[in-house]
Amino acid sequence: MFTNVWDKYLPVLRIVMKKSLAADQQLALNIPDFERAGYKRKSGYKFHVELKDGRLNNVLVDAPIASSLASTLLDDAVVKELANTNEFHISMNTKFQLTIKRIQS
């Protein structure tokens, strides 16, 4: 359901992930994009995704918005290469602000 939204943001996410190698990054997402995709929750939505060794490090069962993000990122060759050599924690708060942090090993 949200794959099209994340595909739209993928080029920006690549850049933000590369920038996060130097410092934590935050990206404000466009709420109407998610509303058009079928997301109607007024209070927003929070999630946390961990990418490590080129794969998802935590289980996302009840969060279709998060699982769509994870699959979109891991299907991309550039992001997969970044995730192979770095650990990233990606979270979204209720204000649709995406935070990307690189975790030092």
Image: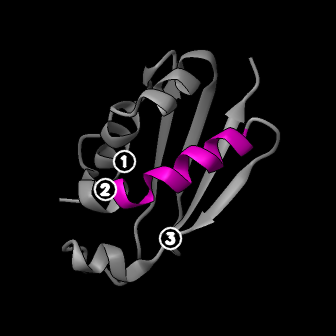
The residue at which mark 1 appears reads as 69
Query: Given contact means CB atoms under 8 Å apart, are the residues at marks 2 and 1 in contact?
Result: yes
Give the secondary structure at mark 2: helix
The residue at which mark 3 appears reads as 29
Decide: is 48 above or below 1.
above
Q: Main secondary structure of the magenta part?
A: helix
Task: Identify which amino acid the numbered label 2 is placed on.
Answer: Ile
Image quadrant of residue 60? top left
Q: Residues within 10 Å of mark 1 (few under 14, many from 20)?
A: many
Q: Residues within 10 Å of mark 2 (few under 14, many from 20)?
A: some
The residue at which mark 2 appears reads as 65
The answer to whether residue 43 is visible is: no
Give the secondary structure at mark 3: loop
Q: Residue 36's spot in the image, x, y percent?
A: 23, 79
Q: Residue 44's spot in the image, x, y percent?
A: 41, 74
Decide: is 18 above or below 54.
below
- For residue 105, side relative to residue 95 (left or right): right
Q: Residue 28's spot in the image, x, y percent?
A: 58, 70
- For residue 101, side relative to residue 74 (left or right): right
> In front here: 58 or 96?
96
Q: Which mark is residue 85?
A: none
- Magenta stretch bounds: 7-20
Image quadrant of residue 6? bottom left
